[in-house]
Image (cartoon, rainbow, N blue to C red):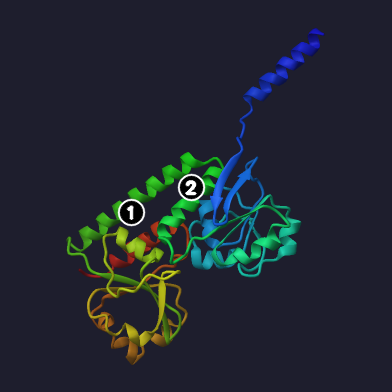
Amino acid sequence: MLAFSRRAVLVALLVMATPTFAQTTITDSRGTQTFAEIPQRVIALSWAVVEQLVELDVPLLAVADPDGYGLWVVQPALEPGVENVGRRDEPNVERIAELKPDLIVISDDQAELAPVLERIAPVIHFTLFSLDHDNAEATRTSYLELARLFDREDLARERLAGLDAHLGALRGKVERHFGGDLPKVTAISLMDQARVRVHGGNSTSEAALLALGLDPAFPQPATTWGFVQKRVEQLGPVEEGIILNIEPFRAADQLFPSPLWQAMPFVREHRFAGVRPSWTFGGAFSIGYLAEAFTEALLTIDP
């Protein structure tokens, strides 16, 4: 009887010493979802939510197209060994099922995948890009919701505060470089010799530039994804301000030597620079990575 009592006490002490996770409810695009445990085997199919999870130090079992992520998103880098489960718009459902995830995270246009994926595991979906809200703010909201689910809210708040401080420091660099006389700046993504995406209202690119204290040189209306597609020659009216092209751009050898490009006022007057690859459709921290890349490019341009 005494031995049993000792065992009972030992078990009670172990239970008291073991961290517990209270049932947690989060809000995604479809309403509220409740989880009894922290998910351990997580698959993310949108690069934006991949970024959010990596920035929370959540280990990922698999993602969609990790090679493409490394080329276009770049930061934050994925841990080695993350499984590839196919394309973002057409993931390998059979492989996802074989990996036995306990959570699948998707966003935006992937909503149509949810009914199929929910046969495998619980699905969280976030609408990060919409004309109905501020995209930059929506990325912060989703980040904090994920932090609640993974019991990492303190870490999330700390990192968001660090992001804001970093943006302030970058703004100071830009102001010192231009002597307080800040230029207007617009970011573009050249697609080929004929087409260009101009990043405007509701874009993470413009959010990054505004955080640096920079108004647009070629203002564009707000859109769902934050860009307007135009013909390259439509950049001609940009008489003042700086144009920054977010790389990679594979047709540079064809477009840049052309008479059309060389006639652009911002090219003739050396108000153009390339920007190292940074993802323009990412989460909250993409704004910071974009601001870093924009600052580097702006410091190459004479005031």
Helix, strand or loop at mark 2: helix
Q: Identify the residue shown where x is 75% and y is 63%.
A: 94
User: Which residue bears the numbered disc 2?
Assistant: 144
Q: Pointers 1 and 2 in contact (CB under 8 A)?
A: no
Instruction: Note whether residue 285 is visible.
Output: no
Instruction: Please tell me in which quadrant of the rendered image residue 131 appears.
Output: bottom left
Report, in whole angstroms, how far the alpha carbon at label 1 lies from the one at label 2: 19 Å
Taking the view exactly as shown, the residue that stands out farthest to the top is: 2
Amino acid type, mark 1 = Leu
Depicted 229 relative to depicted 12: above or below? below
Residue named by callout 1? 167
Q: Name the residue: 25% across, 83% down.
A: 265
> Where residue 41 sits in the image (x, y, percent)?
67, 49
Three-letter code, disc 2: Leu
Q: Is residue 268 above or below residue 150?
A: below
Q: Badge 1, how many Cα within 10 Å: few under 14, some, many 20+?
A: many
| Drawn side of residue 159 relative to residue 46, left or right | left
Q: Considering only order in the chain, which callout, 2 or 1, is on the residue closer to the N terminus?
A: 2
Residue 176, percent from left and from top: 21, 58
Q: Is any atom of residue 267 visible in this view? A: yes
